[in-house]
Image (cartoon, rainbow, N blue to C red):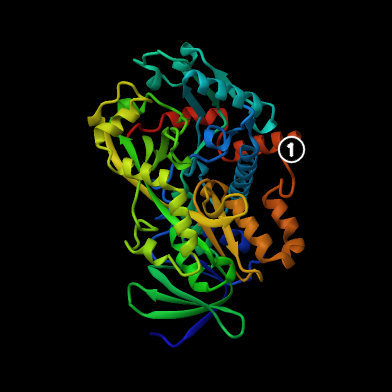
């Protein structure tokens, strides 16, 4: 073990999209601060941010039906959809700033224009979708959305889904063309390339094993260099724990009271990937269905066109699975070792309340390939087993905590920041919409952890994100101006489609 102690201003744990975003925000706001990054894997963006480990949807609530709940009176609550859409607009503005200021190049390497659609079957679901469409289109954030229950129109929108379909019940869909497919792995690597060029000390294959408060108020992290085996000690005034599912253990080791009574439940995902280029070529959209009764929100089925490594791919899923690991590359004992005296009752309460989720996960794990193909055939009636392979996606650790609304042991679906009262340390927990709202979430970290600097930083933040502090929904002219500017900067204008459709169709 090394006896030396290295001092820095900021330590970022994990080289994913969250740490990358926070690192660049801080570098733009306070260029002279020294930032150190520790990542246990060999490269940036290899876990939750990796392009094969998430759906790349660019969550803007354009197609995800679980962001719009039906109330007991039959009306549709769109408040969560509005919130998530506004947060995604913040990400788009920040990425545009990076491109315009040459911090990153070639936006087509990480973002592509792609229609987002919602598809339902059955009279009750069609009624819900129509009400959802009417509620959303009354809001300027969702301008341009179309609704159709005409099979001929739906054949134009998604021929692969409509071919050979037996129409023995009503069917309907919504479509909006301003959706995107985002390669968060590629974006993360671009951002870390830039940080590296700005003398940020990025250390790969360095695993943080412990974190504690020192007598002088700094945070000391113990880091093991996987290559040399040497254990190093680093201290900083501020630490951000952005290690995906691995964040919970480090939050617990920090000992901050805000990290007590919080647990995590891991859920793995499996996608099916089409290996026939002719089939891939027939679909150009992200089409989301509705989760089955009793299934959790993370199980919403969707058929996605993806652009990865300049190739067009087609994925269907996710099928839920279970592994006690909190990361794909971590320990089988993660779940067991996350149970502490302070969160034991919370975890037990969640276990009792979530029996339906447990049953659902067991059923999912037991599915054969042919049973999974039957679920796929609800989207693609003539899908052939030999044309589809399995892909294990990333681990998602859902937060379990005690809440006023849900009581003890409530399973949370979303992204959450936990920070110390003095703002000296923050940890990111949770899952979707995650990466899509990274900029909003990291601005939240700045506001919670550096309140004394926010007035000084605000002009620069507004340069990066013109709508900062403003509701776009309430300012439709600014919304239109930002939509137009970001679409042009990021290559999402109409003429970009012809170029992207010429990409080699290959999985």
The reply to whether residue 312 is visible in this rendering is: no
Residue 436 picture location, percent across and down: 54, 46
Out of 28 and 20, give the one closest to the viewer.
20
- Where does label 1 land, which residue? 478
What residue is rendered at 32% in x and 40% in y? Answer: 363
At a point 60% along the width and 65% down the height, the residue shown is: 419
| Mark 1, other Cα within 10 Å: few <14 / some 14–19 / many ≥20 | some
Instruction: Determine if residue 327 is in view.
Output: yes
Farthest-out residue, bottom? 3
Please state the horizontal and vertical placement of residue 158, each as a whole percent of the image: 44, 21
In the image, residue 250 sits, relative to residue 460, either above or below, namely below
- Side of 386 relative to 501 (left or right): left
- Identity of the residue furthest to the left in this view: 386
Q: In this view, does 309 lie above or below 124?
A: below
Residue 470 sits above or below residue 135 on the image? below
**What is the quadrant of the N terminus in the image?**
bottom left
Please, what secondary structure does the residue beneath circle 1 have?
helix
Residue 381 in picture, x, y percent from top left = 33, 21
**Residue found at x 60% / y 40%:** 489
Q: Position of residue 303 (x, y in %)?
A: 41, 31
Give the residue drawn at x 62%, y 68%. 420
Give 290 or 153, whichever is nearer the viewer. Answer: 290
Number of marks in the image?
1
């Amino acid at each position: 073990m090394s006896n030396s102690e290295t001092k820095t201003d900021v330590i970022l744990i994990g080289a994913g999209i969250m740490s990358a975003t926070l690192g660049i925000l801080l570098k733009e706001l306070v260029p002279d601060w020294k930032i150190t990054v520790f990542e246990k894997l060999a490269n940036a963006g290899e876990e939750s941010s990796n392009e094969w480990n998430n759906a790349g949807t660019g969550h803007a609530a354009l197609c995800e039906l679980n962001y719009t709940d039906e109330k007991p009176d039959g009306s549709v609550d769109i408040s969560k959809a509005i919130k998530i859409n506004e947060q995604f607009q913040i990400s788009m503005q920040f990425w545009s700033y990076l491109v315009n200021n040459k911090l990153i190049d070639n936006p087509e390497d990480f973002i592509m224009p792609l229609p987002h659609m919602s598809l339902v079957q059955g009279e009750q679901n069609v009624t819900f979708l129509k009400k959802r469409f009417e509620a959303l289109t009354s809001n300027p954030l969702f301008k341009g959305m179309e609704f159709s229950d005409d099979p001929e129109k739906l054949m134009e929108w998604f021929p692969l889904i409509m071919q050979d379909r037996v129409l023995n019940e009503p069917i309907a869909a919504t479509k909006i063309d301003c959706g995107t497919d985002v390669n968060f792995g590629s974006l993360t690597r671009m951002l870390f390339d830039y940080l590296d060029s700005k003398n940020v000390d990025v250390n790969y294959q360095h695993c943080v094993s412990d974190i504690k408060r020192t007598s002088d108020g700094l945070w000391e992290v113990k880091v093991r260099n996987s290559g040399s085996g040497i254990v190093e000690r680093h201290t900083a005034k501020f630490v951000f724990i952005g290690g995906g599912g691995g964040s919970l253990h480090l939050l617990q080791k920090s000992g901050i009271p805000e990290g007590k009574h919080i647990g995590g439940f891991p859920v793995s995902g499996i996608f099916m990937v089409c290996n026939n280029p002719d089939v891939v070529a027939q679909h150009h959209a992200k089409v989301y269905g509705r989760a089955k009764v009793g299934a959790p929100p993370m199980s919403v089925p969707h058929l996605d066109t993806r652009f990865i490594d300049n190739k067009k791919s087609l994925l269907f899923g996710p099928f839920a699975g279970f592994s006690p690991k909190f990361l794909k590359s971590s320990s089988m004992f993660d779940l067991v070792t996350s149970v502490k005296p302070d969160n034991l009752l919370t975890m037990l309460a969640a276990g009792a309340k979530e029996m339906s989720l447990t049953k659902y996960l067991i059923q999912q794990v037991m599915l054969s390939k042919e049973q999974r193909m039957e679920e796929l055939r609800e989207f693609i009636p003539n899908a052939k087993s030999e044309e589809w392979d399995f892909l294990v996606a990333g681990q998602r650790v859902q937060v379990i905590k005690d809440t006023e609304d849900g009581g003890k042991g409530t399973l949370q679906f979303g992204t959450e920041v936990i920070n110390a009262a003095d703002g000296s340390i923050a940890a990111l927990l949770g899952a979707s919409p995650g990466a899509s709202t990274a900029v909003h979430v990291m601005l939240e970290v700045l506001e919670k952890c550096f309140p004394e600097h926010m007035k000084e930083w605000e002009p620069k933040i507004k340069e990066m994100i013109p709508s900062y502090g403003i509701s776009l929904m309430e300012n439709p002219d600014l919304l239109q101006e930002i939509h137009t500017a970001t679409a042009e900067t990021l290559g999402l204008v109409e003429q970009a489609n012809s170029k992207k459709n010429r990409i080699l169709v290959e999985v």
